[in-house]
Image (tube, rainbow, N blue to C red):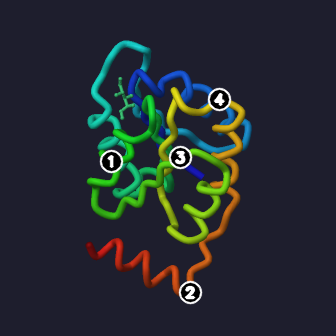
Amino acid sequence: MKIAMASDHGGFKLKEHIKTHLAGRGAEVLDLGTDSEESVDYPVFGKACGEAVASGKAERGIVCCGTGVGISIAANKIRGIRCALCANVFMAEMAKRHNDANIIALGGRVLDEETAVRIVDAWLDAEFEAGRHRRRVEMLDGL
Ligand code: RB5
């Protein structure tokens, strides 16, 4: 699976940690930046990841900023993106099972690395339940 990743400075270290974890899982990572902890604007990076997933360059995406909030808002501005801000494993699992989230957002100043990795794994390992949830996801995509 090809996974696009992007962060601002607040999520940079977490992005790097998750990249290593994803490589260990055998995933291919498309790193869209940023490349350091120098201050940058999260909308640029949320947009880049959203566009990579929406265009099919990557199947899924993971975005990180300080809280995960700003970069999730940016990614969700791109048509076809369902980006879920996840603060725990339950949210991550349900984000796939019920919302078919194609991107998750994580907060580098909110989560420790171990929790973040467990969140990523829960989301990647979960299956979309479809059924009534498909109708709701279609409604989301029609908004
Ligand atoms: C940057 O300082 C911070 O505002 C950003 O990383 C993010 O938390 C915004 O939602």
Q: Residue type at mark 2: give it.
A: Gly
Find disc 1 in the rendering and name its residue: 73
Q: Residue type at mark 3: give it.
A: Ile
Task: Determine which of the numbered discs, if any, sits on residue 3 in the image.
Answer: 3
Query: What distance separates the C-alpha of mark 4 from that of mark 3?
Result: 21 Å
**Which residue is located at x 52 percent, y 29 percent?**
108
SS at mark 3 in the image: strand
Quadrant in which the C terminus appears: bottom left
Mark 2 vs mark 3, foreground winner is 2
Find disc 2 in the rendering and name its residue: 131
62 versus 39 height, above or below: below
Whether label 1 lies within 8 Å of ligand 1 gets the answer yes
Question: Callout 2 environment at 10 Å: few (<14), some (14 to 19), or many (20+)?
Answer: few
Find disc 4 in the rendering and name its residue: 112
Q: Residue 84: x and y, percent?
A: 47, 54
Mark 4 or mark 1: which comes first in sequence?
Answer: 1
Q: Residue 100: x and y, percent?
A: 52, 67
Q: Give the residue at the far top of this rendering.
A: 38
Q: Residue type at mark 4: give it.
A: Asp
Mark 1 or mark 2: which comes first in sequence?
Answer: 1
**Which residue is located at x 69 percent, y 37 percent?**
115
Depth check: give the residue in front, 105 or 111. Answer: 111
